[in-house]
C-alpha cells in the first residue's frame, strides 16, 4: 500500500479520444491508482464516468470529499472542484478560484501530487487549448516524478502540450495513440 | 507554526483544517502579498494585528455564485419548500455563507413560493468582512448573466432582473430580501448551536475540514436541526461516514439533501 504510483492524466479540448484509449490499456493490477482531470462544464451531469467504465474492468469513480485512495482504481475529478491529495491515502476537494479559467485545474492536482507522492507521481499532459498543467508538470519533474507529454504534432489542439514542453526538461514525448501502450509497459 | 500563532494570539483555530487546501492558500497569499519567505509572513502576522483581517479572508474561501448548482435549488423548490410551507414559521441557517449569494438565492425561492413573509434567514460566516456585504445586498453586475441562467435552470420562471436595480457596475437586490436576513459572525470550529432550524445549508465548507472536525460540525448541525428538518451539503460532500448518518435519510433525487428522521 505504501508505495503505489499515482498516475495523473490532464486533458482539455481534443483529449477525450486519447483518454479513452489510455483507460482501455491500463493494466488490471494494484500497483497504482489513476486520476483523470478533464476540463468540463460546471453543472453538466457526468456521463464521463459511464464512458470510462465501458472501456475497462477497473472500477471508475468520481471523487467525493475525503474519499480514500484505493489502488487499482480510476478516479475522475468532479466538475467545479479542484482535486487535491490530503496524503497518500486520501483525496480532498477545494472550491476556490479557477486557475487558467478552469476548475478542476490540472496544475492544482499536479502540484498537490508532486508534494504528496514525490517521485511516485506520474504526470501526463494531453491535447488542449489552454496553458493549464504546464506549471504543475514542472513541479512533478522537480520532485523526481515521471512526466509524459503528448507529442503536440499528434494532438488535436497542440497548445497545451507545447506549453508543457516549454516549461520542462526531461519529459517523455509520446504520440497520443502510443501513450496507452507506454503506460501498459510502465505499470505491468 | 502560523496556525499556532493564529490560535494563541487571535483565537482562530485552523488546526483541524484539511492540510492540502490550507497549504495552497498560504502559498497563494505569499505570492500575492510578496512575502519572500514563510518567516516574513509569520512576522507580519505577529506584529501587525490589522493584517489579520486580510489573512483570515485569504485563508478561508469565499468563492461562490447565486443559484450555484441549480439542480440542488430546483430540488429544494420542488421537494423541500412544499413541506416547509406547512410550518407557521420558517427558520433557515446558512452556515459559512460567505458574501451571501446563496442566502439571496434562497430568499428569492421563498418569495416565489409565497413563504418569505413567514421566514427568517440566518446567515453566518467566520469572516466579518464578507457578511457586511449581505447587509448591503449588492453584487457585481457582470455576474448577472450567469446568475440569471442558473436561476432559470433552478426552475425560476420570472425575469431575474426584476429582483434587482442596476447601479453602474452593481446590482442592488430588493430591500424586502434583506429585511428577512439576520447576519452574524459564527465560527463553526469553536462556537455552539444558537437556535433550532427547519433547514440548514452548509455547502462547500466541510471540504476544508479534516474528518474529525467534519464530524464535530455535523453534530453541531444535528443539535441545531428540528426533527424532520433538512440538511443541505455541497454536491461532493457526504454524511455517510459520520456518526449522525443513521438519523438521516437522503432525498431520493441524487441531491445532497438529507432529512432528519429521528
Image: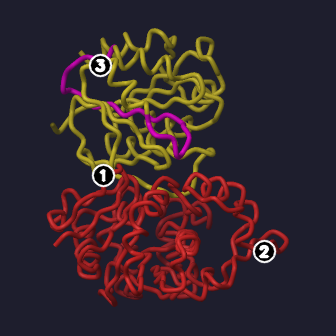
Chain colours: A yellow, B red
Local secondary structure at mark 3:
loop
Q: Which mark is residue B165?
A: 2
The answer for how far apart the CA atoms under marks 2 and 3 are is 53 Å
What residue is at 33 percent from the left and 90 percent from the top? B194
In the image, A160 versus B243, the foreground residue is: B243
The residue where tag 3 is placed is A56
Separation of residues labelled 2 and 1 (CA atoms): 38 Å
* Quarter the C terminus of chain A occupies: top left
Left or right: B90 in relation to B260: right
Q: Position of residue B60 (x, y in %)?
A: 47, 70
Secondary structure character of the magenta stretch overall? loop
Q: Position of residue A124 (x, y in %)?
A: 45, 27
What is the quadrant of the N terminus of chain A in the image? top left
Q: Magenta part of the protein: which range?
A: A25-46
Instruction: Judge whether residue A35 is colored magenta.
Output: yes
Q: Mark 1 near mark 3, Cβ–Cβ under 8 Å?
A: no
Within-10-Å neighbours for mark 1: few <14, some 14–19, many 20+: few
Q: Chain of mark 2?
A: B
**Front one among B21 and A66:** A66
Q: Which residue is mark 1?
A: B252
The residue positioned 46% from the left and 22% from the top of the image is: A148
Q: Are marks 2 and 3 in contact (CB under 8 Å)?
A: no
Tell me where residue B130 sits by quadrant. Answer: bottom right
- Within the magenta stretch, is there residue A54? no
Image position, residue B99 (x, y; %): 57, 74
Q: Position of residue B73 (x, y in %)?
A: 49, 60
Location of residue A92 with respect to B121 vertically, above or below: above
Q: Nearer the viewer, mark 2 or mark 3?
A: 2
Amino acid at each position: 500500500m505504501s508505495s503505489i504510483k499515482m498516475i495523473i492524466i490532464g486533458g482539455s479540448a481534443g483529449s477525450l479520444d486519447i483518454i479513452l484509449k489510455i483507460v482501455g490499456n491500463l493494466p488490471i493490477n494494484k500497483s497504482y491508482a489513476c486520476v483523470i482531470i478533464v476540463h468540463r462544464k460546471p453543472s453538466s451531469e457526468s456521463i464521463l464516468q459511464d464512458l470510462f467504465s465501458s472501456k475497462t474492468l477497473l472500477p471508475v469513480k468520481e471523487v467525493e470529499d475525503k474519499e480514500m485512495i484505493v489502488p487499482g482504481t480510476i478516479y475522475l475529478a468532479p466538475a467545479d472542484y479542484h482535486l487535491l491529495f490530503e496524503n497518500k491515502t486520501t483525496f480532498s476537494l477545494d472550491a476556490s478560484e479557477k486557475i487558467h479559467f478552469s476548475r478542476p485545474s490540472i496544475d492544482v492536482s499536479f502540484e498537490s501530487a508532486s508534494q504528496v507522492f514525490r517521485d511516485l507521481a506520474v504526470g501526463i499532459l494531453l491535447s488542449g487549448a489552454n496553458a493549464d498543467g504546464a506549471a504543475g508538470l514542472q513541479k512533478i519533474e522537480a520532485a523526481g516524478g515521471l512526466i509524459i507529454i503528448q507529442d503536440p504534432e499528434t494532438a488535436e489542439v497542440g497548445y497545451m502540450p507545447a506549453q508543457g514542453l516549454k516549461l520542462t526538461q526531461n519529459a517523455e514525448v509520446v504520440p497520443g495513440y502510443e501513450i496507452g501502450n507506454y503506460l501498459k509497459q510502465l505499470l505491468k | 507554526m502560523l496556525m499556532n500563532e493564529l490560535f494563541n494570539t487571535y483565537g482562530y483555530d485552523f488546526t483541524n483544517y484539511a492540510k492540502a487546501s490550507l497549504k495552497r492558500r498560504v502559498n497563494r497569499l505569499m505570492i500575492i502579498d510578496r512575502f519572500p519567505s514563510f518567516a516574513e509572513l509569520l512576522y507580519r502576522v505577529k506584529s501587525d494585528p490589522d493584517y489579520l483581517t486580510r489573512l483570515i479572508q485569504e485563508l478561508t474561501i469565499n468563492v461562490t455564485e447565486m443559484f450555484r448548482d441549480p439542480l440542488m435549488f430546483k430540488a429544494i423548490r420542488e421537494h423541500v419548500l412544499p413541506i416547509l410551507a406547512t410550518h407557521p414559521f420558517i427558520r433557515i441557517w446558512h452556515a459559512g455563507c460567505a458574501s451571501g449569494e446563496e442566502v439571496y438565492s434562497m430568499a428569492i425561492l421563498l418569495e416565489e413560493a409565497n413563504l418569505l413573509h413567514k421566514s427568517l434567514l440566518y446567515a453566518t460566516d467566520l469572516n466579518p468582512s464578507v457578511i457586511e456585504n449581505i447587509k448591503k445586498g449588492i453584487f457585481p453586475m457582470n455576474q448577472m448573466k450567469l446568475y440569471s441562467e442558473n436561476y432559470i435552470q433552478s426552475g425560476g420562471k420570472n425575469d431575474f432582473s426584476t429582483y434587482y436595480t442596476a447601479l453602474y457596475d452593481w446590482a442592488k437586490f430588493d430591500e424586502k430580501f434583506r429585511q428577512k436576513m439576520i447576519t452574524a459572525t459564527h465560527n463553526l470550529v469553536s462556537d455552539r448551536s444558537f437556535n433550532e432550524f427547519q433547514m440548514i445549508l452548509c455547502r462547500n465548507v466541510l471540504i476544508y475540514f479534516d474528518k474529525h472536525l467534519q464530524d464535530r460540525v455535523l453534530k453541531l448541525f444535528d443539535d441545531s436541526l428540528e426533527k424532520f428538518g433538512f440538511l443541505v451539503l455541497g454536491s461532493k460532500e457526504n454524511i455517510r461516514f459520520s456518526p449522525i448518518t443513521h438519523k438521516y435519510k437522503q432525498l431520493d433525487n441524487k441531491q445532497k439533501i438529507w432529512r432528519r428522521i429521528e
